Image (cartoon, rainbow, N blue to C red):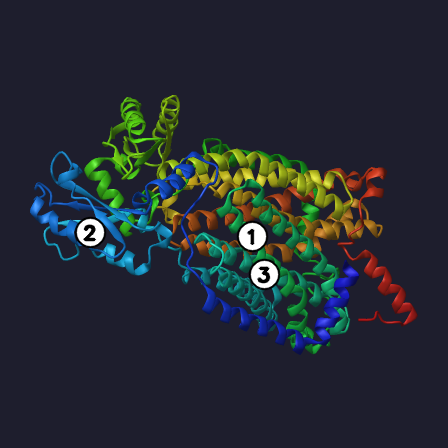
Amino acid sequence: MATLLYRLGRFSFRRSGRIAAVWLLLLTLLGVGAATLMGPTSDKFSMPGTESQRALDDLDRQFPQAGGATGTIVVAAPEGEELDPAAVAPVVKEASETDGVTAAMDPFQTGAVSQDGRYALIQVQFDKAADEVTDAQKSAYEAVGADVEGLRVEHGGEVMGGEVEIGSTEALGVLVAAVVLVVTFGSLVAAGMTLLNALIGVAVGMAGLFSLTGVIELTSTAPVLALMLGLAVGIDYSLFITSRYRQYLAEGLQPEEAAGRATGTAGSAVVFAGATVVIALVGLSVVGIPFLSVMGLAAAGTVAVAVLVALTLLPAFLSFAGKKILPRKQRHAGGGGHTAEDGPVAEGFGFTWGRLVTKLRIPLLVIGILGLGALTLPAQDMRIALPDAGTAAEGSPAREAYDLTSEGFGEGFNGRLVAVVNGEDAQSTGAAAEKATALIKDTDGILTVAPPQLNEQGTTALLAIIPEAGPTAVATEDAVHDIRDRVADIEGADIALTGATALGIDVSEKLADALPVYLLLVVGLSILLLMLVFRSLLVPLKAALGFLLTVGATFGITVAIFQEGHLAGLVGVDTPGPLVSFLPILLIGILFGLAMDYEVFLVSRMREDFVHGADPQEAMVSGMGHNARVVTAAALIMTSVFGGFVLMDDPIIKSIGFALAVGVVIDAFVVRMALVPAVMSLLGRAAWWLPKPVDKVLPDLDIEGEKLNRQLAVETRDETPVSV
């Protein structure tokens, strides 16, 4: 692999103008495609095979007028007063005449008025699903009642779900990344080129992704996740190759040769690191959840583009920059000498830290493992659910409607359930609906059940159910299971429970069931891949255990803040609640790939020195000394990029950005920079042991470029350059 990438690097360096033109042309074409083909994203979380999804599909066929999105307009009189039916009637009339609305129910006819007469709920039925309702129709719905004086009118319901907007807060992460690059390289040219290369890769990936939205349904979270990962890995991968290029220049190599070797050595690690991220993200498809599969594939695509850009466009940029990529004083000295980050003459902090770890390896291991174990403890109480308006940003229309409904009627009115009764004829359907109503009313945690609504044929009935607790409460989840158990034995009709609340519970349970399987798959994959890279048995096991510590501690901290509310105000969490249901499995997949990044970049140099005859302790110190600064910079950059998304209002993106930022900090600075070298020092020569039968079976990937170095040494003696 290293030899192939070496040739690719030299080719891209030599043909820099053409390579840059190809990428810019591709960016232009995909940009045009995105502008002309881009379709809307969706907030619909479908779950094939679940009872709630099956019921929704039946509604579309049997009761189409009730299959569209619903809205709830909350009307409240001033404190101490009661609503006048004549004052509410114009709001109902305006809602019923709104484009896309099939019906609006007068609360005084349906009984949706609070006991004190101050609050009322106007139920609004749309003719299309929430993701099909246009922005104009949503705007018209939100404007209903705006001219009514003396009443407070808020708009909620399924239809209020909106797309996640990418704003300016993410730019703060990029700005921090730029500062870190300038400090790391000591050169504006190097920092700017590395950042520009990564941004072009992100632009290509995002343009391609948006071009596909016209034919593929994406959740609104998917592009943001793709942007988040594309930025982070794109900058990091460019950083690794640029840093190695500067090292070779400082050793006196000519720019073209330095670019080839940097691409062959650091580029090999980039390919492997990128492959692990892509595999982990694509592996989300094995869970069998469509929206999660699409999210994983979208993010994997941007990561793959970041790898390709780093291997081809970056060497072309290096050709344009030449020796300007070095600090000014080294440039004037002809590019010779050693840098503080790479050279053995001026040893940096990495060497000092490596030697310190050797002396304090036992205390570091004890403190690190016990500390991460303690941080993991809150994770045992982790609850997951699909987000509802109760966790939306304070002041948003959906949150205002949620809070006003809870104030007037109780939280259960925000978590309505729907029982769908399908019979062969009107008589059997009516009888089954009557039995179901009686059983559901008698269920713990249920406040009330509305009279059945029948379709024209009378073969399908809808029972609107109001739980006592909110949509994500444990009591509501228990009530859903109890209802399903109670109505299962009713004969003469098929009864299924659905609605946004029931769908959220089903999605969360399926994801919870898939989590251990996916974790086992990821851990097993990490062991296998690292055995291929390092030709060792204990190094992969150590890496997998470190990954588990990272995941556990990250879950614990995220639960403590987002679910339990400790220090929640520091990250802008208005209302603590369950974690979004796909966060744990998504976090495992992404952190796995990122953890393997740092493992490869740190340990590959240790193995390289050990293979060349260094003592195991010397090899560990050398690996830390040569790569600690670069890995530190990479981790700071990735943390700043992820941290920029914590500033967004959307609770889903906020929690994902926070969890990834915390996970990177723990994995890079605690696990990889402290526990890994401590374990390597403790194991010594045994770290590189591999049973001979396994050694014969495993292919040699040459991640460290050992074969390339031997080949170049021979060709240098023969004065025969490698053909490109």
> In screen coordinates, is 577 left or right of 241?
left
N-term mark: 1 or 2: 2
Asked whether disc 3 touches disc 1, contact meaning CB atoms under 8 Å apart, the reply is: no
Q: Is residue 25 visible?
A: yes
> In screen coordinates, is 213 left or right of 88?
right
- Examine the rendered structure and indicate whether residue 335 appears above or below residue 514: below
Between circles 3 and 2, the one closer to the viewer is 2
Q: Nearer the viewer, residue 396 or 176?
A: 396
Residue type at mark 2 is Ser
Q: Residues within 10 Å of mark 3 (few under 14, many from 20)?
A: many
Q: Residues within 10 Å of mark 1 (few under 14, many from 20)?
A: many
C-alpha gap between disc 1 and disc 2: 41 Å
Tell me what residue is drawn at x 48 percent, y 43 percent: 583
Q: Is residue 337 visible?
A: no
Residue 713, image x and y in percent? 87, 64
Residue 147, image x and y in percent? 14, 57
Kind of element beneath mark 3? helix
Q: Nearer the viewer, residue 140 or 678?
A: 140
Q: Which residue is mark 3?
A: 234
C-alpha gap between disc 3 and disc 2: 50 Å
Q: Which residue is mark 2?
A: 96
Q: Which residue is mark 1?
A: 297
> In screen coordinates, is 477 left or right of 297?
left
Between circles 1 and 2, the one closer to the viewer is 2
Q: Quadrant of the C terminus?
A: bottom right
Tell me what residue is drawn at x 67 percent, y 68 percent: 312
Residue type at mark 3 is Gly
C-alpha gap between disc 3 and disc 1: 17 Å
Kind of element beneath mark 1? helix
Q: Quadrant of residue 705?
A: bottom right
